[in-house]
Image (cartoon, rainbow, N blue to C red):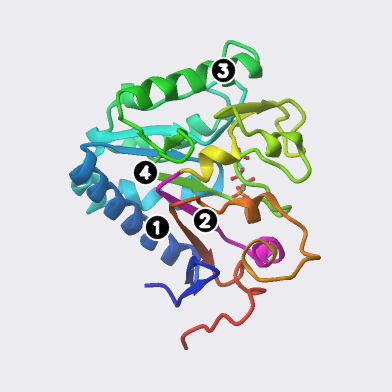
């Protein structure tokens, strides 16, 4: 159970004593969203970012979730991916497969990795085409305001610099408004070549959850969540403000340690 549940600027904060407690709450949250989406639409369209977020999802491979979640109804996409071989240690797809997908009865054809045999630009184009196909069949819902794909849930991590997915501070990819999937070749965080959802797609999701642990992220979390005033640097994580959807932050106490007026239950 979260040590603090708060609402700030329309953002739900679920703060936990440690990553393990956060991981349990995250699994429960995702399982509940999956159940609601499957009941309502017959499918659960989820997109997730990489690295520590994926290991924090590990509880989904354990009881009861490994048996209670309707894995066959999941359609799994990557909100960003490194343009490396799918077998490469840097691949988010490989990390997701090893950490979770190999342990649950998902449908392999419902898991969408990138074409790792082409350039970053081509991989982004092809990925967007696959998403368009799934919007056509309404496996992925559509946002009526801007015709963007409306994922049931997008899960993001955040870097110490406040980047989310592969959208980095002051990078031109942040300004992409037309493409659903864009690419970068100069990522400040290695490896350099990546594809990434654009901000309009992220902000069109029904639910967005940002999952952050560790004191090194505390300052960025504060700048992304709190009311700082006009002089506040606009970090990519601060630009995640779903148009109609709900925004939830999962944090451990270390990552939440610089948030204004957050009360921790004793
Ligand atoms: O492919 C990537 O690198 C990720 O998608 C990236 O956006 C990640 O989520 C953050 O850098 C946080 O990574 P950690 O949670 O591992 O610090």
Q: In the picture, which quadrant includes the N terminus?
A: bottom left
| Region in magenta | 205-222
User: Tag on residue 26?
Assistant: 1
Q: Is residue 216 magenta?
A: yes
* Relative to 192, 145 lies left or right: left
Residue 144 visible in the displayed image: yes
Residue 69 in the image: state x and y as whole percent. Answer: 23, 46
Residue 152 has which mark?
Answer: 4
C-alpha separation, residue under disc 4 versus residue under disc 3: 22 Å
The single residue placed furthest to the right in the displayed view is: 231
Q: Residues within 10 Å of mark 4 (few under 14, many from 20)?
A: many
Q: Secondary structure at mark 4?
A: loop
Marks 4/2: CA distance? 16 Å
Residue 18 drawn at (x, y percent): 50, 68
Q: Earlier in the sequence, mark 4 or mark 2?
A: 4
Find the distance from the CA under tag 1 to the CA under tag 2: 9 Å
Residue 211 got which mark?
Answer: 2
Q: Nearer the viewer, mark 1 or mark 3?
A: 3
Decide which of tag 4 and tag 3 comes sooner along the chain: 3
């Amino acid at each position: 159970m979260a040590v603090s549940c708060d609402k700030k600027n329309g953002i739900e904060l679920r703060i936990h004593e440690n990553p393990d407690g956060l991981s349990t709450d995250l699994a429960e949250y995702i399982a509940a969203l999956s159940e609601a989406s499957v009941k309502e639409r017959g499918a659960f369209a989820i997109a997730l970012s990489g690295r520590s977020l994926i290991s924090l999802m590990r509880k989904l491979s354990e009881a009861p979730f490994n048996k209670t979640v309707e894995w066959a109804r999941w359609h799994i996409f990557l909100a960003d991916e490194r343009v490396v071989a799918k077998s490469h240690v840097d691949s988010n797809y490989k990390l997701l497969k090893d950490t979770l997908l190999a342990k649950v009865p998902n449908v392999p054809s419902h898991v969408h990795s990138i074409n790792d045999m082409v350039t970053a630009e081509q991989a982004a184009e092809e990925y967007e085409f696959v998403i368009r196909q799934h919007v056509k069949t309404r496996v992925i819902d559509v946002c009526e305001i801007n015709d963007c794909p409306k994922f049931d849930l997008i899960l993001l991590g955040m870097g110490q610099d406040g980047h989310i997915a592969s959208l980095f501070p002051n990078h031109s990819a942040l300004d992409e408004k037309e493409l659903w999937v864009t690419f970068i070749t100069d990522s400040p965080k290695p490896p350099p070549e990546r594809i990434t959802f654009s901000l309009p797609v992220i902000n069109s999701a029904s639910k967005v959850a940002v999952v952050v642990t560790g004191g090194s992220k505390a300052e960025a979390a504060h700048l992304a969540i709190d009311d700082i005033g006009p002089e506040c640097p606009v970090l990519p994580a601060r630009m995640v403000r779903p148009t109609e959807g709900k925004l939830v932050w999962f944090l451990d106490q270390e990552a939440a340690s610089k948030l204004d007026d957050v009360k921790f239950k004793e």
